[in-house]
Image (tube, rainbow, N blue to C red):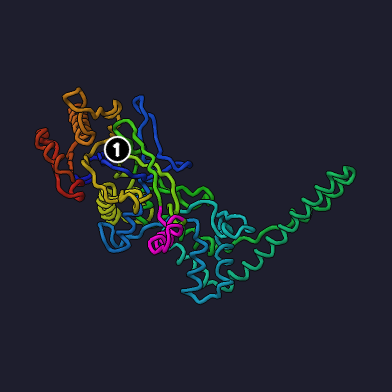
Amino acid sequence: MTEALRSQFLSLHLIETLAAVLPVRDENAQPKTLVFGGVERHMITSQARRRAERVHARNRANTGRGALKGRSMGVRTREWAILAGRELESAHGWEKERTLVTARAVMEASGLKFGDPKKKTVANLTKVLVFAPSDAASRIADHIAGQAAEVEEWRDAYLEAQARAEAAKKSRRGAKKKAGSSPETEESEETSTAEPAASVSLPPLPKATRDAVLLALAPRDAVDIALYGRFLAEIPDSPNVDGAVQTGHAFTVHEAEQIEDFYAAADDAKLDRKRTALSFLDAADEAGAGMTGYQSLISGTFYRHAVLDRIQLRTNLRVAGMDGQEAETAATEAEKEFVNAFVEAFPEAKKNSTASTGSLPALVLAFEGERPYNYASAFQRPVDESPVSAGGEGPAGPAAVRRLLRHHTFVSRRREDLRTARVLTYDPEIDALLAELGLPQSLTVVERAEDLTP
């Protein structure tokens, strides 16, 4: 292991203050919460955070920005058959009628389950989200087009067998209904229908085609799959990946505070008529908003935490087919981009009406260790934002920074594996606070997110 990798885990801790936002909601469109330290706190789930960070890194890579520019990235979707069908049409000139039915049949026979064929909205969607390299659809389409005669001959036989199996199933159901009304015929009816149903078998997908589909859907060199992992149970021989990133739920360091914001949306046409009304009655008739309602918004200072397992990341990349040097280079780039996404990315719910994605953290703390370190316990006692003169801790942002750094300094004196700690702030008040606190020599202040990694 190189000097830069003398510690396996990179721990990241962040304090951020948000005002009047709603980054994530529950099934009732309410802010998510948890109880911690005896009080209710607002929560931003790890799922929302991980998706925001993954998409942030992928978009940067796909547009030639960031440490992962030019690297293969993944896409998580249920639409792989639709995407493969579009590739067959656009890149290989297939008629639209042939494309989707072929792509769906091939992927279904490979082991993926699809929605009810009688429901158009889900018929061509896989039952589960499949996280695969972004070029998986074009690879599948390329193989189908290259083996068109064999694949289409198999497809026709497969669809015909499916139709016969479905007909046999319907016949058996009808026989059972009849048997329910006439018990004496149950045995004879079941005997006559069970045999045809059992005799219908679907022709197996040609091995070369199934291998091509599995290779297309395999993680391969998609860096974000190596980072965040994936689980695909429907195809046992398609490899799963243990993620190298661990993400905690973000929560407020103080008790939750929520507002119900009443809003009124204007109807432009009604207001225009009102302004040009020729009489009092006309103006009165057009009074009132076009639509009204309530939305829940939250404000608060959040603690956020994530960990990168450097060894797991390199293992994932090597298993995907990279040699040692290539895996080392890709892992170094992935670590830089992961840290950048942790600092920069934000869930996009209500981003236009709250400008939440413009938030910057008050403080980021990064350090290496031989195990992950979660500092949630520093905030088990909720911050009391009443004035210091009244016995409180003052505003939650500076109070949380003080607690986090005090907690880290205390732990560092007792754990020899903690090293090369770095802090970053985007808040001038916090910057002044850092100077006031007199940080230990083991803690370095940096000015850019990329400097948070060695």
Image: 36 above or below 188: above
Percent across and percent down for residue 102 are 57, 67
In this picture, is 207 found above or below 228? below
Residue 434 belongs to magenta span: no
* Residue appearing at x 50%, y 56% in the figure: 78
Give the residue displayed 46% in from the left and 64% down from the top: 137
Q: Which residue is mark 1?
A: 300
* Rendered location of residue 156, percent (x, y): 65, 68
Bounds of the magenta segment = 265-284
Q: Nearer the viewer, residue 399 or 95?
A: 399
- Where residue 256 appears, x then y in whole percent? 34, 33
- Residue at image coords 20%, 26%: 414
* Disc 1 element: strand
Relative to 266, is 95 above or below? below
- Name the image quarter holding the N terminus: top left
Q: Residue at x 37, y 43 (%)?
A: 261
User: Is 276 within the magenta?
Assistant: yes
Where does residue 364 sit, x and y in percent of width and height? 22, 42
